[in-house]
Image: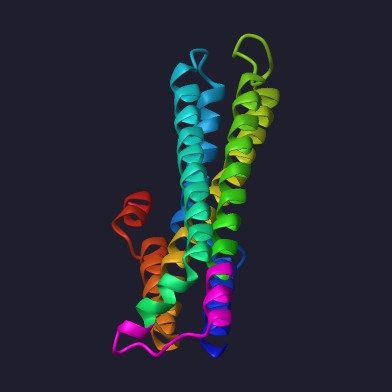
C-alpha cells in the first residue's frame, strides 16, 4: 500500500508541477502552447487555411488512435480478470516472486483498468475539443471581412481551445506512461517504486531537458 501511495503521489505531484506550477511556462508543453497561439495568429492573416485544417485533422487522428488503443487495453484488463487462476499459477511457478493472494491480484488489475479508463476519457475529450477547435478556426474571418482586432480575438479563442485539447491529450499520454510504471506492482512493491521513479525521470527530462524543448527556446 505504501508503494501504491508513492505511485499516486508521484503522478499527482508531477502533474501539479507541469500543469499548474510556475514551472509550466518553462516546460515543453508550456512553450508549445505559445507556439499554438502564434499559429492561430498567423492563420488569421491568411485566407487559404487548408494547411491548418489538415494539421487539426492530424491532431484529431492522434487522439482517436490512442483512444482506440485505450479501449483495447481495457479489454486486455478484463481478460486478465478472466485469467486469474492461470496468472496466480504463474506467480507460484516463478521462484523470485512471492505468491499473490487472489484479492490482491484482482485489486492490482482493477487499478490498471482504472488508469486505462482514465486515459480513454482524456483522449476522447481531446478528440472532441480538437473538433471544436476546427469549428472555431472556421469562424475566424478573412482579412477583408473583419477588422484586425476581431480576427485576432477569434484566432486566440481557437488557440485556447487547441491548448486545452492538447492538455487533455498530454494527460492521456501521461496515463499510458504511468500505466507502464504501474505494471511493476505485479512484480512487487519495490519494483513499482523503481518503475515510478524511472517514468517520472523520463517525463521530466522530456518536459524540461529534452532536445525538443531546446529547439523551442533557440
Residue 55: x %, y % from top left: 45, 29
Given residues 28 and 199, the one toward you in this image is: 199
Determine the residue positioned at 55% across, 81% down: 104
Q: Quadrant of the N terminus?
A: bottom right
Is residue 135 found inside the magenta-colored segment of the image?
A: no
Above-or-below relation of 1 to 214: below
Residue 149 seen by the camera: yes
Q: Where does the magenta region start and end?
A: 92-110
Q: Is residue 75 left or right of residue 90?
A: right
Determine the residue positioned at 65% across, 22% down: 148
Determine the residue positioned at 59% across, 55% down: 117
Given residues 142 and 209, the one toward you in this image is: 209
Residue 115: x %, y % from top left: 56, 62
Q: Looking at the image, how many numbered discs can be counted on the residues?
A: 0
Given residues 141 and 147, the one toward you in this image is: 141
Is residue 107 found inside the magenta-colored segment of the image?
A: yes
- Tell me where residue 162 sits by quadrant: top right
- Tell me where residue 90 sits by quadrant: bottom left
Residue 10: x %, y % from top left: 52, 77
Given residues 1 and 34, the one toward you in this image is: 1
Residue 93: x %, y % from top left: 31, 83
* Snapshot colouring: rainbow
Q: Residue furthest top?
A: 144
Residue 196 seen by the camera: no
Determine the residue positioned at 60% across, 42% down: 124
Above-or-below relation of 90 to 3: above
Amino acid at each position: 500500500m505504501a508503494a501504491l501511495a508513492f505511485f499516486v503521489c508521484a503522478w499527482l505531484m508531477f502533474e501539479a508541477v507541469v500543469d499548474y506550477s510556475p514551472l509550466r511556462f518553462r516546460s515543453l508543453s508550456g512553450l508549445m502552447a505559445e507556439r499554438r497561439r502564434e499559429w492561430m495568429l498567423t492563420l488569421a492573416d491568411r485566407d487559404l487555411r487548408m494547411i491548418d485544417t489538415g494539421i487539426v485533422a492530424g491532431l484529431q487522428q492522434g487522439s482517436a488512435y490512442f483512444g482506440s488503443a485505450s479501449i483495447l487495453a481495457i479489454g486486455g484488463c478484463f481478460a486478465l480478470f478472466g485469467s486469474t487462476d492461470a496468472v496466480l499459477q504463474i506467480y507460484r511457478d516463478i521462484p523470485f516472486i512471492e505468491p499473490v493472494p487472489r484479492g490482491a491480484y484482482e485489486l492490482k488489475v482493477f487499478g490498471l483498468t482504472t488508469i486505462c479508463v482514465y486515459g480513454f476519457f482524456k483522449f476522447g475529450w481531446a478528440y472532441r475539443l480538437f473538433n471544436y477547435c476546427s469549428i472555431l478556426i472556421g469562424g475566424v474571418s478573412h482579412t477583408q471581412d473583419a477588422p484586425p482586432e476581431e480576427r485576432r480575438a477569434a484566432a486566440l479563442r481557437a488557440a485556447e481551445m487547441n491548448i486545452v485539447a492538447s492538455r487533455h491529450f498530454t494527460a492521456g499520454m501521461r496515463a499510458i506512461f504511468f500505466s507502464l510504471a504501474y505494471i511493476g506492482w505485479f512484480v512487487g512493491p519495490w519494483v513499482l517504486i523503481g518503475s515510478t521513479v524511472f517514468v517520472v525521470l523520463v517525463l521530466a527530462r522530456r518536459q524540461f531537458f529534452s532536445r525538443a524543448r531546446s529547439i523551442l527556446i533557440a
